[in-house]
Every structure is written in C-alpha cells, then in structure tokens.
Amino acid sequence: MKHHEAIPLLPVARGEGCWLYDFEGRRFLDAISSWWVNLFGHCNPRIGAAIAEQLGRIEHVLLAGCTHEPAVALAERLARTTMGRLGHCFYASDGACAVEIALKMSFHYWRNAGRPRKRRFVSLEGSYHGETLGALAVTDVALFRDTYAPLLMAGSRVASPDWRGAQPGESAADYAVRRALDLAAHLEAHGEETAALIVEPLVQGATGMAMYDAEYLRRARALCDRHEVHLIADEIMTGFGRTGTFYAHEQAGITPDFLTLSKGLTGGYLPLSVVMTRDAIHEAFHDDAVTRAFLHSHSYTGNPLACRAALATLDIFDEDAVIAGNRARSARLTAAAAPLATHARVRNFRNTGMIWAFEVAGAGESYAREFAARALARELLLRPLGGTVYFMPPYAIGEEETDLLARRTVELLDEVP
C-alpha cells in the first residue's frame, strides 16, 4: 500500500469497449483485460441486457436444496463445450476457490476409492493457481508463497516446459518432451501417493507468461493415466479463447479429469467459477453415507445473475465466430508488434493466441512500477510482471487500438530506464 503514496490509484469513472475513463474524461486502453477477465469490452450491451433481464426474475437463491434455470442451463452449455466428456459442474465464486475444490475433490475421490495414500499434489515450477491456502500450496511464485509457507500442505514441483529454458537448437516441442521425462521420473517414484497433477495449459500466467508446447500436455495425460493420477487443467486464465482455441487443452487433443474455469467465464462482469469433472468422479460421491459426499459450499454458489452473464458470454462465442475473429486479431497485433520483437531491449518476444509477452533487458526491481506509471501517461493500462511486459487485451480491440498499443509500447521501451 505504501507504493500508492508515490503512484496514486487510477480513479475509474466508467468503461466503454477497450477503454477506461477517469473522472476528468481521460482514457486508458485496458490492455490487460482488467486482470484477464474482460473478453468483449467494458459495458458490453448484450451481457448487460442479460443481467438486467435476470434482475427482474431472481437475484439469488441458495443452491442447497434449491435450483434455478440459469445454473442448470449454464452447466449444460459448459458440458457441451467439452463434448460431454466433463458433464458435471460444481460452482464457486472465484478461481482460487475452484482450485481448492478440484484439489479437495481429487483427494476425496481417492479416499472414497480406498486409496487414502494418494493425497499429494504435483505442479510445475513457476506455477500460479491462487492465493488461498490450498491453491497457494500448488503455487510456485515466491512473492505470494514464501510468507505463508509454514501454513501450507506439502507438495512437489517438477520442471516447467517453458520453452525459454530450451538449449540452442532445441525446439519447443523437443524441450517439452525432455521436461516430460522429469514428470515421468517423479510419478514413477511417487505415483502411489500422488492424487493429481495440476497445470496451467500452454501458458503459465503470473510467473511471466511462460509458454510451452502442447506436446507436454499429451505426455502428461498419458503419464497420469499410467500412474492413476488425476490431471487438473487450470484454465482460469487460458480458457475462453485466450490461447487460440476455446480451451487451451484442446490443442493437445486431451481431456483433463478436472477443468477449473473463472475470469472470462462471465465476460468480466461478475465473480463466478466452476469445476468440471467426469462421470466416474461424480459417481464416487453418489452414496447414502454423508461422509462420502463432497462437503463444500459457498453462500453465492451458482448465483443466477453471474450464471446469466456467463450464458450471454457463451452466446457471443456462438453467434460471433469469436475464435476465428481472434485468430485475425492475433495476427494483426503480432504484425503491429514487429518493431517490438526486434527492439534492442526485448528478449524472448512470444505469442500464444491473444497473449503476447517479452522480457526487457536491464529491467531492475522497480521497473514494473515505473513502466506502469509512464504507460498511464500514454493512455495505456499495463502491469508488467517484474521485467516481463505482456498484452492480454479484450477481444473487442480494433485496428487503431492495436496500432496504438504497439507503437506506444515501443516509445515506453525507449523512455523507461
């Protein structure tokens, strides 16, 4: 909080499309989708109208002993996005809670299956899955984790397939295969006590937009099957078209055992998350004994307004050919960013779908704060992750906004020491 004495908070009065406006009418391009949640622009009329219509019906009712149409309809729509392979949905309020639920559900499944030794979790180096205690236990970002380490359950890390670690001449796919050997060795030694592997498919966000080849996911799926370990795909950031397909794991041609979703689920309107899972896992909790049931609840689980926003978001995907449009938008921004990719200070310029990132040579400890402050002066809302600058704009970004984002970022590289 002390940093705000030097860099004041941005007072936001309203939003429209990709732009935020302060109380004096100054505008700022939301190039990070307000922490990766906003898909179709601020004040999207279709999502807003859906929420307004729902307000006239029911704003909230407990989802314990009750049900309602938006929650049922959303579960059915989400199941169809996985071709019915993940046909069961458990609602929560945010991404970290979804991760907590997936971890608990995996552990409890193995307990119900008579395998109580399977209680440990493995994640990737540099992983980020949230900041509640369970989610933090499978997170590997020191800034968030270290203070609370004494409170966390024990877990294991295996090397990340982040292609920046590849040797000269080694392809991203070859490096993914090499890193999968580390996972194979770990599960060979510890598979009997491992409940689940949790990964951010294709892009590890908070560690600096670490990107990797889909071959790692294919190998991980096969290894999890071999050692009877659940695969949790944390698509809280990568889902809903962000990586070029509706879900990132689709690019590997696999299906996880658990899929966690949030952020873009409601188009950036209301807090909502969901854990999706398979029939076999659902059946393990279908029992008369209360202790075999999955005991977890949130007061606002399946909130009708949030579910209606999510249904409107899915409608836009269905009606507007969003994935195809994103491919065109991605190509346009990548072309506009060509001067960035070749800039003398830029290292590891990379792109996956609607995510771009690069490191800045010589960036010091305070670089991110200085860069963010000067970006606001150039009408850009950017929040670098240490020395990594990234773009993750709403899918509503147009050609003029694309050019402005790329051009002014080059200016910032020349300006910020």
Image (tube, rainbow, N blue to C red):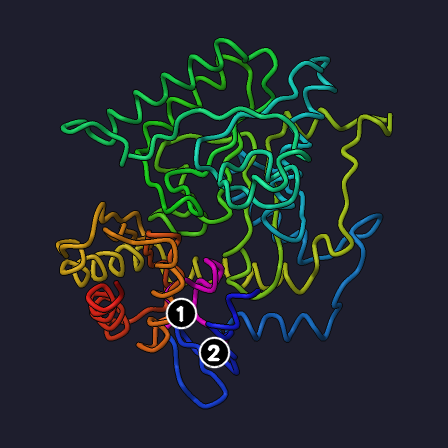
Q: Amino acid at mark 2?
A: Gly
Inter-mark Cα distance, 1 to 2: 9 Å
Q: Residue at x 43, y 12 (%)?
A: 185
- In the image, residue 288 sits, relative to residue 370, either above or below, namely above
Q: Residue at x 52, y 31 (%)?
A: 198
- In the image, residue 293 sits, relative to residue 387, either above or below, namely above
The residue pinned by badge 1 equals 30
Circles 1, 2 touching at the beta carbon (< 8 Å):
yes
The residue pinned by badge 2 equals 15
Relative to 165, is 278 on the left or the right?
right
* Residue at disc 1, secondary structure: strand
**Image quadrant occupied by the N terminus:** bottom right
Give the camera-side residue of 37 and 311.
Answer: 37
Q: Amino acid at mark 1?
A: Asp
Q: Quadrant of residue 40?
A: bottom left
Relative to 335, is 223 on the left or the right?
right
Give the camera-side residue of 397 and 417.
Answer: 417
